[in-house]
Image: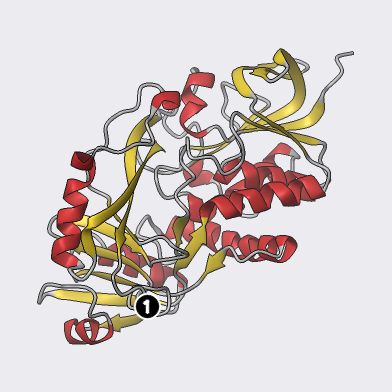
């Protein structure tokens, strides 16, 4: 009889993986988490101090149950760890009434009867003078929007998991994953050299490294470089969580998003439509950013948030793993029995991380997932 090193392994302890480890531990599972760096590192897709939280989602109504479950779990994690992780400061969605931003958000709001307030152009200019808007711009104010502290959330989830008995291996890079008749074999290399492990099931939260480790997946995944950019706020109070909040803004051919100045960082602004070069090797995506990469973001900021200092820029490289439909990949793929995927969050996954971790943990221990995972099937493309 083959001896298992643990019932479960969680590979990757970023946003999804750290939450998965915690939710496995809350179920009493014997679980080991593997991380090639240390939790909260800047070399994947989960760094950058903050992420947006929303339940009024442009991505579609199918994400609302996941986001609402995530909200409950973020609050539970805060209580467990004694750390503030999520500030629901509210936010504003701006754009033309018939554009590509507001109609899908309104569809989501109406489908789930979410609290909101519609604002006219004049009301926006009065309440949010930081934004320069077009005469045709209208708005939706969402009280359920806020900011998550990304690295703090990851570390809190790992601490909570360890407190419940989970084990963690840091500096341990995964080389191969192979399901078999007697569980799943994992080969890794770390401080003690190369080693082979055996587990009953493995949860893959390996982000940009997933396709390389599981080449037989039927779902295409493409890793792309993206930027994290912050701009100086000469008047920090004007751009803080209480007066500025979170925003999405369709203007000048872009879907822009942003978070308020928070804890020594400037105002975070990104453009969804920037060119995103493919990343051939996720281990070689530079953290450093050439000024030419953020020039378009700075130009947009100078037009639409003119009281920010568009020359005072802090920037970091990041990467996202995309599927063709930009939906997540959560479930047990046909090609890899014994493996649970929690991957391919396509640039909009951090807010959902606690819920993704919970459903992945449920699948790993044969519990019923708390939300419908049909839209996220790893085999939906064939």
Q: Farthest residue in the left direction? A: 135
Q: Position of residue 364 (x, y in %)?
A: 71, 37
Instruction: Report the number of numbered marks.
Output: 1
SS for dot 1 = loop
Q: In the image, 117: left or right of 290?
A: right
Q: Farthest residue in the right direction? A: 1
Is residue 149 visible in the rendered image? The answer is yes
**Label 1: which residue?**
237
User: Is 217 situated above or below 146?
Assistant: above
Colour mapping: secondary structure
Q: In the image, 195: left or right of 270?
A: right
Q: Residue at x 26, y 58 (%)?
A: 256
Q: Residues within 10 Å of mark 1 (few under 14, many from 20)?
A: few
Q: Position of residue 76 (x, y in %)?
A: 69, 64
Q: Nearer the viewer, residue 329 or 277?
A: 277
Q: Residue at x 28, y 53 (%)?
A: 313
User: Is 315 situated above or below 281?
Assistant: below
Q: In the image, 132: left or right of 324?
A: left
Q: Nearer the viewer, residue 9 or 189?
A: 189
Q: Nearer the viewer, residue 169 or 198?
A: 169
Is residue 368 visible in the rendered image? The answer is no
Quarter occupied by the N terminus: top right
Q: In the image, 274: left or right of 212?
A: left
Quarter occupied by the C terminus: top left
Q: Position of residue 372 (x, y in %)?
A: 57, 51
Q: Position of residue 146 (x, y in %)?
A: 46, 68
């Amino acid at each position: 009889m083959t001896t298992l090193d643990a019932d479960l392994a969680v590979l990757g302890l970023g946003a999804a993986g750290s939450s998965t480890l915690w939710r496995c531990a809350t179920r009493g599972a014997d679980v080991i988490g593997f991380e090639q760096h240390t939790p909260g590192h800047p070399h994947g897709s989960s760094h950058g101090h903050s992420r947006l939280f929303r339940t009024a989602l442009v991505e579609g109504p199918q994400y609302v149950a996941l986001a609402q479950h995530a909200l409950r779990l973020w609050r539970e994690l805060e209580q467990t760890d004694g750390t503030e992780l999520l500030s629901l400061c509210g936010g504003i969605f701006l754009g033309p009434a018939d554009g590509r931003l507001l109609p899908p958000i309104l569809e989501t709001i109406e489908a789930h009867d979410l609290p909101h307030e519609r604002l006219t152009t004049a009301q926006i200019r009065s309440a949010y003078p930081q934004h320069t808007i077009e005469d045709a711009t209208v708005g939706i104010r969402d009280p359920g929007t806020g900011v998550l502290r990304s690295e703090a959330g990851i570390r809190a989830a790992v601490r909570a998991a360890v407190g419940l008995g989970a084990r963690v291996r840091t500096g341990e890079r995964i080389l191969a994953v192979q399901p078999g008749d007697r569980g799943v074999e994992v080969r890794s290399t770390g401080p003690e050299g190369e080693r082979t492990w055996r587990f009953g099931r493995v949860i893959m939260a390996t982000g940009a490294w997933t396709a390389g480790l599981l080449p037989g997946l039927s779902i295409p995944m493409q890793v792309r470089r993206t930027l994290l950019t912050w701009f100086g706020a000469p008047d920090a109070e004007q751009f803080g969580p209480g007066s500025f909040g979170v925003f999405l803004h369709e203007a000048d051919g872009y879907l822009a998003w942003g978070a308020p100045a928070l804890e020594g960082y400037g105002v975070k602004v990104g453009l969804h439509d920037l060119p995103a070069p493919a990343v051939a090797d996720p281990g070689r995506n530079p953290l450093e950013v050439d000024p030419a990469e953020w020039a378009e973001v700075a130009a947009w900021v100078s037009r639409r948030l003119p009281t920010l200092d568009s020359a005072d820029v802090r920037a970091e490289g990041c990467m996202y793993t995309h599927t063709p439909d930009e939906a997540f990949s959560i479930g047990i793929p046909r090609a890899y029995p014994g493996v649970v995927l929690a991957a391919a969050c396509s640039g909009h996954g951090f807010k959902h991380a606690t819920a993704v971790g919970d459903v992945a943990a449920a699948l790993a221990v044969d519990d019923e997932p708390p939300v419908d995972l049909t839209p996220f099937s790893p085999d939906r493309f064939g």
